[in-house]
Image: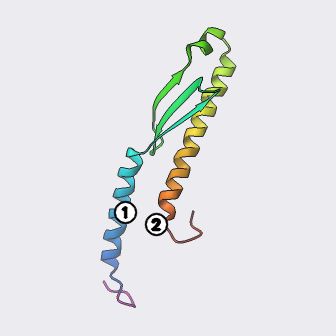
Amino acid sequence: MKLPGGMDINAMMQQAQQMQEQMGRQMKELVVDAAAGGGAVAVKMRGDFEVISLTISPDLVKDGDVEMLQDLTVAALNEARRKVEESLKGKLGGMLPPGLM
């Protein structure tokens, strides 16, 4: 189906699907590292927001401060999420019209 100006809607849809598939692959390949407490809690997260590792320093467990351990874990996870979002904005920003991100 041709639109005014000679644009082919089917070709546009096919291109959009290819871009979506490419972005999905890039998201799974992207891995970010984040840490809190000077590295006492470290997280690795994929671009699809799946946590693939969480490392906690044995010293934190020895201290027995559960609240601090929880706070540092949340901080590291939030930092990893922020890094993924920042990376995705950079990748998506080049594909979308201005003002959509």
The disc label shown at residue 19, or none: 1
- 10 Å crowding of disc 2: few (<14), some (14-19), many (20+): few
Identify the residue at horizontal 55%, vertical 45% (top origin): 83
Magenta segment range? 1-6
Outermost residue on the bottom side: it is 5
Residue 57: image quadrant is top right
Q: Assess whether mark 2 and mark 1 are in contact (beta carbons under 8 angstroms).
A: yes
Identify the residue at horizontal 38%, vertical 60% (top origin): 20
Identify the residue at horizontal 36%, vertical 84% (top origin): 7
The disc label shown at residue 89, or none: none
Identify the residue at horizontal 48%, vertical 37% (top origin): 45
State the quadrant of the N terminus.
bottom left
Q: Secondary structure at mark 1?
A: helix
Q: Position of residue 77 (x, y in %)?
A: 57, 34
Kind of residue indicated by mark 1: Met
Q: Please give left or right for residue 52 compared with residue 37 in the image.
A: left
Q: Position of residue 25 (x, y in %)?
A: 35, 51
Kind of residue indicated by mark 2: Met
Q: Secondary structure at mark 2?
A: loop
Picture layout, residue 64 above or below residue 101: above
State the quadrant of the C terminus.
bottom right
Residue in front for this viewpoint, 84 or 40? 40
Q: Please give left or right for residue 61 compared with residue 51 in the image.
A: right
- 10 Å crowding of disc 1: few (<14), some (14-19), many (20+): few
Residue holding disc 2:
95
